[in-house]
Image (cartoon, helix red, strand yellow):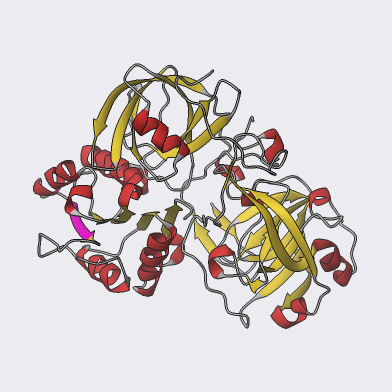
Amino acid sequence: MAIRGSNSALRVIEKPPGLTPAVRWQSATVTSIVMRTPRITSFVFELSRPFSFEAGQHVDIRLTAPNGYRAMRSYSIASEPGESSSIELAIERLENGEVSQFFHEVVVVGDTIELRGPLGGYFVWSEKDGGPLLLAGGGSGVVPLVSMIRRCQRVAADLPVLLLFSARSWDEVLFRDELFGFEQKRNGFSLVLALTREPQRRPTDFARRVDAGIMADVLRRLPAAPKYVYVCGSNAFVNSAADGAVAAGVQAPRIRTERYGV
Amino acid sequence: MVTRGFIGRQQAEGTSGRIPPGQHLVDDFPVLSAGPTPRISHDKWSFTLKVGPRPIKKWDWTAFNALPQSEITRDIHCVTTWTKLGTMWRGVLVDDILADADIEPPTAFTLAYTFDGYSTNVPVPDLVGGKAMVALSYNGQPLTADHGGPARLLVPHLYFWKSAKWVSGIQFTTRDEAGFWELRGYHMYGDPWLEQRFAGD
C-alpha cells in the first residue's frame, strides 16, 4: 500500500504494516557482557518471554529506582533475527548517559532488567524486501544494520549489500572482525570504512566524514541502483549521508533513516 | 520491579510536575525523522484543508503568512523519552485556519499530511481551542528544515510525533484513522502523561 500525501508525494511501502498488538514489559536476564570497542559493550539478554523480530527493530529498556523514578531508553537489536530466546544489544557509553553509564558501570551477568519489544516497524529489513542495499552507519548507528547483514549472510548471502561505516578510528569499528569475515567470503557483501580521526588502512576506504562525494562513490560500487538505503547515526551523519544519496539520484522514499536525535 | 543498583538522577529544580513519567529533560533539541530531510522552498509550499477527499481551501506561502499569527510557549515531549521545557513558537492557530476557510469542523477526527508522505491522526478537540497551530517559527527564528520548516504542525500536549514536520495539510476524516507511526504500533492518541507510547499502553 502507499500512503498518499496531499501533494501526491508517495512513500513506497511494499509491506502492509497492519496494527500490531500491545507490546508488554518483561524481565530479561543478562547472560553475557562483551567489550566490543573502547566505548561500546555488548550485553546479551535471555528473554523470559521470547519474541521474534525483524532486523532493524529495537527494544525499550526501563530502569526503576527504589523511589519509583524510572529512566527509559531505546536500543537497536544487534542479533540476527530468528528463533532464539536471547538478544544482543551493543550499548555505547555516552557522557552523561544516565542509562548507558549504568550499563557500563553497574550491570553484571545475572542481573535482571526490564525491557519490551520488538518496537519500530519502518527501519526494518527482511529477505522479502530484497536488494541491492546500501547501508550507512555512523558509530553505534551501525547496530541495526549489523542485524540486517547477519540475517542477509544467513539467508541471502549473494544479495548485493554495501555497508558504509563511519567510525572515529580503526579500533572503534564495531564488529570489525565479523564484518571483515563476511567480506572475505566474497559473496554479495562489501564493507567501506570512513575513518574520521585516522588515515585509512585500505585503499578502498576513506579518511574523512561521509559527504556527497563518498555517497556517490559507494553507490557506483553497487552492481545496480539500491532498492533501499538505510542510514543510522547522529543527526549530522544521517543528514549528510541521506542528502548525499538524494544528490546522487536515489529517490527519497527509498531512503530510511534512524537518528539518535542529536 | 526495582533495578538492582539503579538510583537515577535527581530532577532539576523548578521542573516539578512538568516532566511526564518515563521522560528525561534535555537542553538541546533532538532531531528525529524516518527519511531524508525534505527541502521545500516557499514557492513550492502550500497548505490544504480537506474534508475527506475534497479540498476546501488551499493557501500558498504568502497567503498563509497573512493569516493571524499567535505565539505560544509550551513544554514538549518526544516518545523517545526526551522532554524540552518552555519552547517558544509562532504560527497560525488551527482555529484561525478554520476561520479563514469559514468552516466548523465537520467531523471529530483529522489526519495531518506532510510533504514527505508522513501522516498522523489527531482528534479535532486536540486541534482547536488554541491547543494547536501550524508553526512557522521557533525561538524567534524561521523554522529550520531539520525541525520541520517551512512549517510544522504543533500539538504540544501530545507526544511530539503528532506534531508533523513539513506539514502540507489537514484532512477531516469520519473515523479515527491511523497515520504513519500509528500503523506501526504507536498509540492512536499519545498522551505523554498517561505514557500512551504504543498500542495497548
Tell me which secondary structure the magenta stretch mostly adopts.
Answer: strand
Please tell me whether residue A120 belongs to the stretch shown in magenta: no
Q: Is residue A144 left or right of residue B167?
A: left
Is B124 drawn above or below residue B17 in the view shown?
below
At which x and y percent is residue B132?
Answer: 77, 57
Residue A44 appears in which quarter of the rendering? top left
Is B20 drawn above or below residue B84 in the view shown?
above
Residue drawn at x 59%, y 35% is: B22
Is B97 drawn above or below residue A169 in the view shown?
below
Q: Is residue A22 visible?
A: yes
At which x and y percent is residue A181?
Answer: 12, 43
Write the start and end of the magenta stretch as one range: A188-194
Q: Is residue A211 left or right of residue B158?
A: left
Residue drawn at x 36%, y 44% is: A128
At which x and y percent is residue B170?
Answer: 73, 61
At which x and y percent is residue B191?
Answer: 70, 40
Q: Nearer the viewer, residue A124 or B96?
A: B96
Residue B165 appears in which quarter of the rendering? bottom right
Q: Is residue B155 visible?
A: no
Q: Is residue B45 left or right of residue A16?
A: right
